[in-house]
Amino acid sequence: MSQYYPDHYSYKFKLKLNKLPAKAVDRFSRWILLLAAVCGALLLVLGLYHLLNLSFEGATDIEKTLPQTHIKIHTLVSPTIFAAILVALGSGIMIYSFINSLRYKIIFFDGNTFTVKKQPLFGPSYSFSEPLYNYSGVRLRVKFYQFGIFNKNKFIIELYHKDESKNIPLYINTNKHRIRKLWKYYAQELHMPALTISEKGMVSRNFKELDKPYQEVVSGWHLQKDFSYRFEKPDYITFKSKKSGEKMIKVKKLFFDAYSFLSIFTIIVLGSLLVYALCNHQIIVQHLPYNLVLIVYAFILSIIVYSALSLVTRDIIVISKDKLFIFRKIGFVRIRDGVIDFKSIKGLDINFTPTSERYFLAIVADNHTTTFGNKLPVDGLRWIRATLINEIISNMKKSD
């Protein structure tokens, strides 16, 4: 189910439909590319300096004034190999920045037809025009995006076409705030069905029904009382009830995927680099300012800690009489990620992210969308979804 078509480039994008004709440019952030290019250039220069044994004017006189040291230099990694790694890493970052600076899409909409001009990496630019009525609807999807060792959820609202190379971005942001309202806005403005990608394929909804509370939607299904018991609870999920009436769903197993192994690789590489630097700390502080060395140590350590925490984070849902509490558990620490009132829930959707081959449960409200179980198998997400629907139905009956 992976997609092989070029995706949208932006992290923040908005096609304004309140004044036609509308025009917007979809491209990678220039500020991020500039920062990446500068960092890559610094790594490249540093690597070349050590690899080619370059010297600056006056460097010899400065070295003569430095105090002599008898500390043994530990060489866990060959200096030549380490310098070559810096050159390769710096060159790779600069090439990546250059490639992304060349690609962009200019989108133009006159109210009836979309015209898109694309500038690919290789070859001349080209354009295509497509009438609005050739699109199937306004699709909301979440793209799991890996930016180095950091990952973000990129929320994308787009016009969906059977030829996915003709998909038109309407709104893109890494902030999930008001994403459902914006999805509804674009569907209503364009008079198109609202689409999502579920575990069973594409799901289409009438945009007029997006305002309905999920309690009202569920009540129309006329589900049997024991429907949730038809789903077998997986062994990696615990379900507990307290005397107070609260219930807790907890994922007790850690799941790993390709992105997890990237985090492990980052921990190993940066951990080795930090150990190497600490073993040669006295030599390093003779050539670099002491405060700068500490800042670099802290930065590397923070990346290692972040990568380690991303591996051991597990999700928890606490169900009260009328609310859901979403927690992320890291070791013995719980961090609350959101509180959602049953009445504000507009959807419980099992969505599929093609780029990462992941399923997740989207708990959708008007002003925000909370994701749960990003790495869980789909059978576990189905059980959690059925359990939450059962709790919503029970809450409705108690309210009546």
Image (cartoon, rainbow, N blue to C red):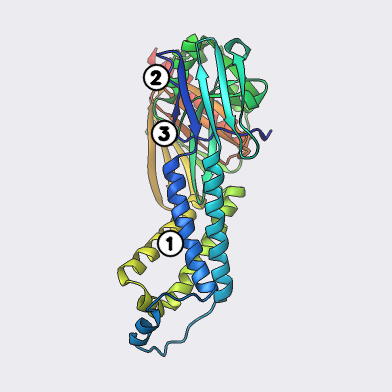
Tell me if label 3 and label 1 are in contact, CB under 8 Å: no
Q: Which residue is mark 3?
A: 175
Q: Residue furthest front?
A: 57
Q: Using residue 120 as the reference point, say whether residue 149 is left or right of it.
A: left
Of residues 227 and 352, the one drawn nearer to the viewer in this rendering:
352
Of marks 3 and 1, which one's residue comes earlier in the chain?
3
Q: Quadrant of the C terminus?
A: top left
- Secondary structure under tag 2 reads helix
Of marks 2 and 3, which one's residue comes earlier in the chain?
3
Tell me if label 2 and label 1 are in contact, CB under 8 Å: no
Q: Amino acid at mark 3?
A: Asn
- Secondary structure under tag 1 reads helix
Q: Amino acid at mark 1?
A: Ile
- Judge whether residue 6 can be spotted in this image: yes
Q: Residue furthest left?
A: 291
Residue 166 location (% of width, % of height): 62, 23
Q: Which mark is residue 343?
A: 2
Q: Which mark is residue 179?
A: none
Total numbered circles: 3
Q: Using residue 36 as the reference point, say whether residue 352 is left or right of it.
A: right
- Judge whether residue 272 can be spotted in this image: no
Cα distance between the residues tagged 2 and 3: 23 Å
Which of the two marks, 2 or 1, is nearer to us in this view? 1
Cα distance between the residues tagged 3 and 1: 26 Å
Residue located at (39% from left, 60% from top): 299
Q: Which residue is mark 1?
A: 300
Tell me if label 2 and label 3 are in contact, CB under 8 Å: no
